Image (cartoon, rainbow, N blue to C red):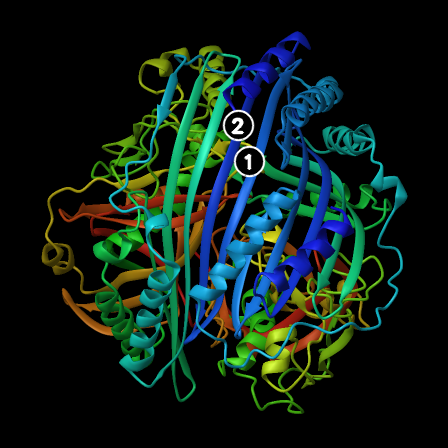
Amino acid sequence: MEDIIEEALDYGKEMNAQYVEIRLQKGSITSINIKDRNVQKTSIGLDVGGSIRVLYNGAWGIVSITNITKEEVLKAVKEAIKIARGASNMVKMPVRLSEVKPVQDKVKAELVANPADVSGEEKISTLLTLSDGLLKFDNRIKSVEIDYADMYITQYYGNTDQTYVEQEKVYVWSRIVGSAKENEVFTSARHELGSTKGYIIWKEDPPGKIVEKMGKRLTSQLKAKPPKAGVWPAVLAPEVVGVFTHEAFGHLGEADLAFSGAVTLQKIGQKVASEHVTIIDDGTIPGAFGSFAYDDEGVPAQKTVLVKDGILVSFMYNREFAAKFEDFLRMRFPQLLEVFNTKPTGNARAENFRYEPIIRMRNTYIAPKDYTFEELLEDIKFGYYFKAFRGGQANLDGTFQVGIQEAYEIINGEIGNPVRNVSISGNTLETLMKVDAVGKDFELHSGRCGKGQLAYDGDGGPHIRDKKITVGGEA
Amino acid sequence: MDEELINWAIDKGLEWGADEIEIFSTYVDSFGIEVLLGMFPKTSKNIDSGAGIRVIKDKKIGFSYTTSFTKESFEKAIKEAISSASASVPLKDWVSLPEPDKYPEVRNLVDSKLVKLDPDEIMNITKRIISMLSEKDKRINPLSISSGAGYSKTIIANSRGVSVQNEKTLIYVGVGVMGVESSKRTPMIFEFDSSTLFDIKVDPLVETVAEETLLTLKEAKGRNEKATVIFHPFAFSQLLTYTLIEVLSGDYVKRGVSPYIDKIGETIASEILTLIDDGTLEKGLVSGKSDDEGVPMQRKILIEDGELKGFYFDNYTGKATGNASTGNGLRYEMHGFSTTPYANLPKPQPSNLIIKEGDEKLEEIISEVRNGYMLINLQGAHSSNTESGDFSVAAAPLWRIENGEIVGSLPGAMISGNMYQLLKHITHISKETKKIFHMVLPYIAIENVNVVVK
């Protein structure tokens, strides 16, 4: 592979490309789907392909292929240059890549347990135990669907800036979705697990405990009542803090979206949250679902502080957008270069060879502080406790929405009745400004995020309290 | 992707121990351009080919796929599929793979101009949009302008004698802009068009985006209330996808979790609602001779004048429930997470979904609303509760209608309700329809929708 890459890079340079990058991949992907007690899918996919990315006259040309013989890779380089050249008359500002130190490295996966050493029978049997356990937990639980996947990917990466990295990436992931029904009330619950340390997800999070947790959530929500719509104080549990941090703030902290005019663009180096809030995106937490050694531009992963004590101090970058922000600040606000990071942060990730690397989060969280859970609750006369989420979404204008699957009333500082079908929404920065207390506990959860392509990531934090959150419901 | 290799693979699969075997093989060649902020062009070309191999052994399903079209890779994939099946447990209600059948001829799915595509022609569309936008109001900022086209060819063959080939071309254009006025920002305003033929028109897209952006910049006041909301096809398509469409699938029926089981023949929606799934729609994005497991595509009415007429099935859920496949065994990912079709097993998914247009113009519908709203797009449809139909989403944007006129937008508003109840409260359906990917939808007015303002 290394020789094909070397030859293709040379060929691109000869054809006058400013920059060439070749990423070849070989992967084996196991996936299993269980619906109730039926095994509907057991699959082992053999995924091989490559991505060629070039810069020519300031424009990008990207080609992906599934046949990666030397001949086809060279053809793809030529094709990438051709389409980039075709678009180069639309360039109003040529793309520049921020400089990084060249790297030569070979990274082996460090696994506690290799999923390839576990038989298909054993994987299936664990999933069936889980499904059966949930269906037996309570007869009001009507359906369970479990997806499981593990993938072992070897990636060969080289670019014309003298970086060459071979990297093994291993992901093990599962998601369980259950639903319950009583009379005309339906509830649902989901739980997601992931690791980059191998087949240890069920050791870290045993099936018995998952059944207990999801079973209780499904049945307690059957008795829940709808929330009161309006603006209320709220305590968010780590899982909800995680999805809020990822969806509501995180996407606005991605440099490509910020550059496109997200509300954060006007807040560089300024206060975007209360002084209790520090937000970090970290690709170096061992075993965490969003961790890796090098991103898909060959830049080492790192721990990036985005918000420090309420002040916006960095975005998440790939090489292109790090350069864009450096140029932008130098031209317009040079004094900000001292307080705001514009160096690449190692956030360029591609789902696989079919996609180009774009700016993605890794493990994103709010850093813990000093409150206990009881202290967070005690001043609230009436409000809500949001314990678990189902999905969320953000928009460039700074509005977010997070669906909640488990929530309770807070009455006079105590947890009260469950409420269901809740979702919260608001303006992200206004909401972050109203965080008035941050807990001392901490949890990190595994998840997946879609931004035209899929990325595995983690998110989390401690419990936090917010003075004002918009709760949707009956008008 | 030669047929000889596919036939060889079917013979070998049986020889190596499969009771049944199916090969789903695709070749896709596509080109796209996206220009960020009207300044930074990015071009991409994808050549993706692969084969999905499904085997059945003692009613156990095994699957594998490969991106390499050699005998060695096929042999490896077939053996992986057989060993996957061996590790699995029997699917007691499995009957068999599809049988050979007669296929419909669907018109206008391939445009020869798009088969041998000149990337420059696609790039010119984008250039034109950017230049049109630059002549519009300065408050309208291009975010992402994209266009692309592609050609795909699929062969489906199985050991029961099915052998069918589908070809299709596709072209799309997307215009995403943001309204900016001092510190005010609109959510992304987006218009989109697609077709199987090179016949899309960009001028109306640009006009609509510009109009919608300026309207959204104007702020209005609303209050927390239950009111009439007119759903734009964009907003409605997302809510449909995560609620009604899902529970009309054979999968929900087979598992006994659809709220509509045993409701065939009952009125479940306003009598002005008719919903059709049509895999034979001319120029339909999900049209073809066959679905992705070789069953003929069909047109079927799911809801007629408010009455539930039927569900949609793939081969497995159709046969297992004593029905038959309705030609909805499809391998694309409706919920947007990216995968290639050959890496997926077929499952019951809608083909082209059509809500029959009404007989009033949108303009007339708006003019009849004294106090109400119009929802253009939304955030968070995927957090809906599919089985109950409950949803609670952020509006992006929501327009206020007062005395028959749109007066401005309400930033930060939320819309909530129960889809299955709201279907009964549809009061108007517009004459105008919009194509949203695989859906063709009109504007739909519904009363009694919860609106929560900031």
Q: Which mark is residue A23?
A: 2
Q: Where is residue B358 in the image (x, y as percent from the top left)?
A: 78, 73
Parent chain of label 1: A
Question: Is there any visible trace of residue B231 in the rendered image?
Answer: no
Q: Which amino acid does label 1 sit on?
A: Phe
> Could you tell me which residue is drawn at 14 percent across and 64 percent down?
A413
Parent chain of label 2: A
Relative to residue B59, is residue B381 depicted above or below? Answer: above
Marks 1,2: beta carbons within 8 A: yes
Q: Where is mark 1, residue-wise? A: A353
Question: Is there any visible trace of residue B112 in the rendered image?
Answer: yes
Q: Which amino acid does label 2 sit on?
A: Arg
In screen coordinates, is A233 left or right of B370?
left
In the foreground, A409 or B292 = B292
> Could you tell me which residue is drawn at 66 percent across and 70 percent down?
B445
Q: Where is residue B126 in the image (x, y as percent from the top left)?
A: 75, 32
Distance CA(mark 1)–CA(mark 2): 7 Å
Q: Which mark is residue A248?
A: none
Q: Position of residue B94 (x, y in %)?
A: 56, 78
In the foreground, A96 or B398 = A96
Relative to residue A370, is residue B366 depicted above or below? Answer: below
- Mark 1 surroundings: few (<14), some (14-19) or many (≥20) residues within 10 A: many
